[in-house]
Amino acid sequence: MMNQKPLTFSEGIKDAFPICIGYLSVSFAFGMIASAKGMPTWAAALFSAACVSGTGQFVGLNLMSAAAPLFEMLCTLAVINARYLLMSVSLSQKLPVGMNLWRRLVVAYGNTDEIYAMASTQSRPLTFPYMVGMIVISLTGWMAGTVLGETAGGLIPQSFVVSMNIALYAMYIALIIPEARGSGKIAAVIFAASALSCLFTFLPLTAGIGSGWIIIIAGVAASVFGAAVFPREEEAEE
């Protein structure tokens, strides 16, 4: 078998360019919402650079604007972003064996859903320059969209900027509907989480619970429900 040529930095930029375009639009909406909530441009840019998580940033921004306790925010974002732990463990199996710790930390920092999907489907061996190329171009789109959204938020009528809050819910719907249509089990878990969230929000005894804790309780409870009712079947041994 012929040795495969290692992936390069420029190939990483080329492969992740569509991700950059997608991030530009999502982070633009985040920047506009951040502007509407009074967050300065430098803070929004720092938020995007430190978090690099679409769902995490939208939820975190809403919790911050609602003056949620720090511990509640930390727990909520930890639950929302827990999938990155599994994704990083999976991706680490494809990285070069000799890659040192600081390089692995760089890859972990930029390991988003889209970058993970792109890297996982590569038939050629992954390299650090290739991963950096994907991270650099993707982060460029994420940061540029945030700054542009913040700038546009100061130029566009406030009523339109405030209406951009619906982008959070639109993103959630875009994430869950395709999965729910393809699997009745996933649809049942989503319904359970939604029902629990509504109950905790509107029942008098639980109405005072913070929105972050409601996300944690509903998400964990729905996950336990799914694991108990729809256990994963062991793959048959060949």
Image (cartoon, helix red, strand yellow):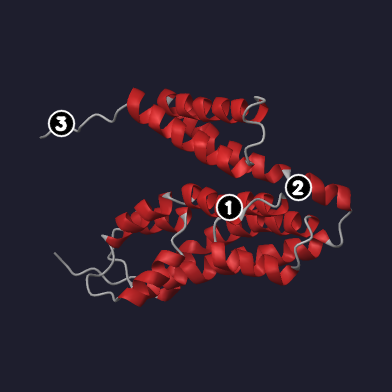
Tag on residue 203? none
Residue 18: quarter of image: bottom right
Tag on residue 236? 3
Residue in the foreground of this view, choosing between 236 and 50: 50
Task: Say which label, 3 or 1, has the lower sequence index.
Answer: 1
Tell me residue 101's x, y (percent): 32, 74
Residue 99: quarter of image: bottom left
User: Is residue 228 found left or right of 187 in the rendered image?
Assistant: left
State the CA–CA distance, disc 3 to disc 1.
Answer: 42 Å
Residue 141 visible somewhere in the drawing: no
Residue carrying label 2 = 164
Instruction: Please state which amino acid type lies under the numbered disc 3.
Output: Ala
Vertical placement of residue 102 versus 35, above or below: below
Give the structural element (helix, strand or loop) at label 2. Answer: loop
Instruction: Please state which amino acid type lies under the numbered disc 2.
Output: Met
State the CA–CA distance, disc 1 to disc 2.
Answer: 22 Å
Tell me residue 198's x, y (percent): 62, 27
Number of the front mark, 1 or 2:
1
Screen quadrant of the C terminus: top left
User: Is residue 100 found left or right of 160 in the rendered image?
Assistant: left
Circle 2 residues within 10 Å: few <14, some 14–19, many ≥20:
some
Screen quadrant of the N terminus: bottom left
Give the structural element (helix, strand or loop) at label 3. Answer: loop
Circle 1 residues within 10 Å: few <14, some 14–19, many ≥20:
many
Residue 6 visible somewhere in the drawing: yes
Task: Say which label, 1 or 2, has the lower sequence index.
Answer: 1
Tag on residue 73? 1
Q: Residue at x 72, y 42 (%)?
A: 166
Vertical placement of residue 206 versus 15, above or below: above
Tell me residue 220's x, y (percent): 45, 37
Q: Residue at x 59, y 40 (%)?
A: 172
